[in-house]
Amino acid sequence: MHAVTWSLIRMHARGVWAADLVEDVRDPLQTLGIQTLRNGITAASFLATACSLIAVQGILPTLLDQQRVDRLDRIAAADPITKGPGFFDATTKLAIGEVVILFSFLAFAQSIRMMNHLGFYTKVVPSKRNKNKHFHEEEAIAMSYRAATTFTLGFRSFYAFIPLLMWLFGPTALLCSTVLEVVALWFTDTLKRKKVREYDVEAGGSVAGKGAAQNGNAVVEMGAAQGSASRRNNHTSGAADKGSAAVAVGGD
């Protein structure tokens, strides 16, 4: 068993998916690829919308309201670590949070842009009109990589915004939220998987087990068929003997 990160698996999976999608022109695979792109665009659009609402309707009005800023400064002054005003006031913290959430919005927007272009490439690369190879498979793979990278950057920025939001209440809230988030992301982004050899051994054992079971079932079915055939032969022989006896009696 060895640990791998989810981002590593995601990058390789998207590259293989994009390569297969632009090589195979069968309608079922094309339909599945377009549906997958649509799901990705929908998810990125939802997250980009959430980031824009937080930036425009959440942080910006608070940043422009001095009463709210003063109230946040008073809350942060009661922190047990600093025991008074810290190095950064609420205005600076809100400005940093605004920059981070806007960066997350731009990253999700770039992911949507790349996935939109990739949707066209799935049809253009294998097309018969692309005889001069102006559009290549490597470009589609690069687009899928970039879409995945920008989507990950948007999510990471969104994750980073949570401790920054807690920072408004003081360094203690920042420290606790950062530790909890790092631990949670370690368990969610790290996967335990077996080595390829272990998978091969298990697959071979399962195939052998299935083959033995199938052979056993075939032997049982063959024995049952032979038993039924012998019973039918015995029944036919008995009926023939009875008919011969009846004929003999009638002749007498």
Image (cartoon, rainbow, N blue to C red):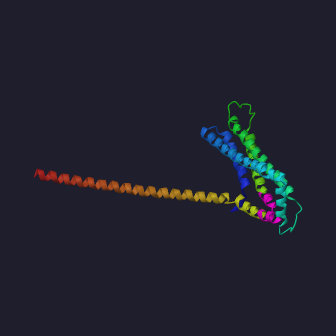
Residue 208 in the image, given as x and y percentages of width and height: 55, 58
**Apparent side of residue 107 relative to residue 249 in the rendered image (left or right):** right
**Apparent side of residue 73 relative to residue 138 in the rendered image (left or right):** right
Q: Residue at x 78, y 50 (%)?
A: 55
- The single residue placed furthest to the left in the displayed view is 252
Q: Is residue 150 visible?
A: no
Q: Residue at x 30, y 53 (%)?
A: 232
Name the foreground residue: 226 vs 204: 204
Name the foreground residue: 21 vs 94: 94
Residue 128, image quadrant: top right
Q: Is residue 1 magenta?
A: no
Name the foreground residue: 78 vs 1: 78
**Main SS category, magenta section:** helix
Residue 75, image quadrant: bottom right
Residue 22 in the image, given as x and y percentages of width and height: 68, 39
The N terminus: image quadrant: bottom right
Q: Residue at x 80, y 49 (%)?
A: 102
Residue 78 in the image, given as x and y percentages of width and height: 83, 67
Q: Is residue 27 visible?
A: yes
Q: Is residue 164 above or below residue 48?
A: below
Q: Which residues are magenta?
A: 162-177
Q: Is residue 93 above or below residue 107?
A: below
- The single residue placed furthest to the right in the displayed view is 87
Q: Is residue 165 magenta?
A: yes
Q: Residue at x 72, y 58 (%)?
A: 189
Residue 214 in the image, given as x and y percentages of width and height: 48, 56
Name the foreground residue: 231 vs 168: 168
> Number of numbered discs present?
0
**Apparent side of residue 93 relative to residue 198 in the rendered image (left or right):** right
Q: Is residue 33 above or below residue 229?
A: above
